[in-house]
Image: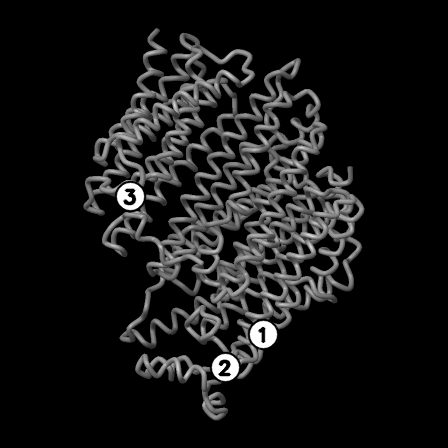
Amino acid sequence: MLWLLLAVPVVAGLVALVLPWSVPRRMLLLLTSLSHAGLTATCLLRTPPAVWGGWLALDPPGRVFLAVTSFLFLVVTIYTVGYLVRDAKRAREEPDRELPFADAPEAIFTGCYLLFLGAMTGVIVSQHWGLMWVAVEATTLASAPLIYFHRHARSLEATWKYLLICSVGIALALLGNFFLAVAVRGVPGGNVHLSIACLESHAGELNPLWLRAAFLLLLVGYGTKMGLAPLHTWLPDAHSEAPSMVSALLSGVLLNCAFLAVLRGHALLAKAGMAEFSQDLLVLFGLLSLAVAAVFIINQRDYKRLLAYSSVEHMGILALGAGIGGVAGFGCLLHAVNHSVAKALLFLAAGNTLAWSHTKSTLQSRGVKRVLPGTALLWLIGLFAISGSPPFGTFLSEFTILKGIVDAGRWWVCGFYLGSLSVIFVGMSAVILPMVYGEPTGSEARDQLPPELQTSEQQVGLPAQACAIARRHEPLWSLAPPLLLAAIALVLGVYVPPQLSLWLQHAAASLGAYR
Amino acid sequence: MWFDSVLVLIVLTGLWLLGSSRLLACIQAIALQGLLLALIPIMASWPQVSLRLGVVASVSLVLKAVVFPLLLRRAIRTAGIRREIEPLVGFTTSILLGIALWGLAVHIANRLPVDSPQGSSLLVPVAVFTVLSGLLLIVSRNTAIMQVIGYIALENGVYAFGWAFAIEEPLLVELGVLLDVFAAVFVMGITIHHLSREFDSIETDQLTSLKD
């Protein structure tokens, strides 16, 4: 079963790379994500037996992350297929139009997209540190071509930074793996290898100094991939330049996978009785990420960068929750689920907006409500869902983390956490609300004006009639997937299904969060 | 004795990388470093070389001494560039920094509570030095090619560390790691190709349009 879960996306991805026809390729894309979701559902209902000598297994934390990954991937794929069809149609109908950029061949995009799913599944089901490293590096390599889908200078710059920074970070994580191996050498009896279960059962006998150094390297390595400040520098660039559905996946799924790797390191230290060391580091990185995100969100002029910095913020919250432990450990897993749903929703809304306004500038994309009423609704729901307002899921999880902090009596942390959350809420609203409710400036009409008139026109806005003309048709594929996510974000706020709650509790317990 | 000379040669290739402005020379240096690196596990466990070790060492040899140099040469051919013109840190300074890094590496290695590294006491400092020199190359050089070379040096250092402790990872994991490193350099090579087309240069100080 687990083999199938890995093999389906990988094989389909390789096939998609060489398949020359676009319609069957898109069918393959949909079918693969459907069957991956189906397989995941089967695995969730009945835990599959471990394979390959226990190296591949679905443990409790893996269950939560696999469910989120597979489900989000399916929802986003529906959007992706619509997006690809629209882009191809545009290229076909207006071959002479001066395009600002060309797209990468769709075969490469689809192939890498599916391989990316395979690599992320690999991270989640690996029960061996070496294997997990291989899978995390594979996610970087598979997703780099996705960021460079729209071929222009900025996306290329983002791709280069992503590749280099993440590869260097992950190389340090490999050194961390080797440090783990050195920590194992002193264990009497020998024959301890780097499988997660085996290390945890011998955790008490590992060399503490090497283990601590190993955790530091793993945290820096996988933390780079997760986007924890100050190692987050690749994240805003990659998230803002990638096509929006790819940003949704990077933010909603990939960051979670890296977080899982960090959590596993934390669990190992907790089992070895050195929880304090890893907890302090996680809290430190968490608070730093919150602070950096707050600073860059205020006055942000680019709505995709805004969402990217919000991802840095939420990764900070996750690290903070994991570091505090106790009930916050449960809260941070719940928050990982909520953040994925809400952030994917927002990035898809951003994709719709970008397709209309052709700019990521918040000033020039005003008037979403007039032109794209459905997307405007998504922006509003997304804003409240991501900033932790009731009745959305993030409220519940952020509140749980707050309770954990208060329980632990960390008053400084508590104040800092609440302060940054409120600053970020105000900052995000100040950017998003004018974008939604402002007067449209009619980007196409404005483009034809001479530059000196463009600014004045921006201030005046277009008359209502022009808005009616400009109102775009919003196809179903661009609204249904994010609306579904919006519904889930809402439901998770008022009702966490008992089954999900049980999985989260098991996951938190197995990660040592309850100690 | 032979073993120690190989290790000293690895340090010299590291300094060569730091001091050379010609990209072709740097590619030769990194190829030589890869070759010497593949010798370490063989020499450390001579004469009982296990099959696993032989396979890993030869795959690593082919990748680092043959495939990577070919990929990098192709990249500089398409980019039409021969030299690193204006590094952030000059070449003389880089060499001096490299020597300082060697001192730091020895210091770190002395402080590490090591029970028994294989073969030679030089192995750990050499590994640490190679990691540090790779990091220095990445942050101080301007052309994308030199940054990739720095990444390979970093990876070489990490590997040398693994071999210093004869860390036995299962063969498949080991090959997976090598495959990933290969894919990373391959994808970076393609990206460099695009960079040279898009910007007419591969100097990363031109990549400044994304910022806050």
Disc 3 versus disc 2: nearer the observer = 3
- Residue A487 percent location from the top left of the image: 68, 68
Pointers 3 and 1 in contact (C-beta within 8 Å): no
**Residue at 37% across, 81% down:** A454
Circle 1: residue type = Leu
**Is residue B103 positioned above or below A82 on the image?**
above
Residue matched to label 2: A473
Residue matched to label 3: B143
Q: Is residue A73 visible?
A: no
Kindly state the secondary structure of the residue where label 2 is placed. Answer: loop
Q: Is residue A483 visible?
A: yes
Alpha-carbon span between mark 3 and mark 1: 42 Å
Query: Chain letter of disc 3?
Result: B
Kindly state the secondary structure of the residue where label 3 is placed. Answer: loop
Query: Dot 1: within a 10 Å radius of its alpha carbon, few (fewer than 14), some, or many (20 or more) residues?
Result: some
Circle 3: residue type = Thr
**Residue at 58% across, 56% down:** A252
Total marks placed: 3
Query: Dot 2: within a 10 Å radius of its alpha carbon, few (fewer than 14), some, or many (20 or more) residues?
Result: few
Label ID, residue B71: none
Alpha-carbon span between mark 3 and mark 2: 46 Å
- Residue B9 percent location from the top left of the image: 31, 18
Q: Are marks 3 and 1 on the same chain?
A: no
Query: Dot 3: within a 10 Å radius of its alpha carbon, few (fewer than 14), some, or many (20 or more) residues?
Result: many
Q: Are marks 2 and 1 on the same chain?
A: yes
**Is residue A36 positioned above or below A21 on the image?**
above
**Residue at 64% across, 23% down:** A208
Disc 2 versus disc 1: nearer the observer = 1
Residue matched to label 1: A433
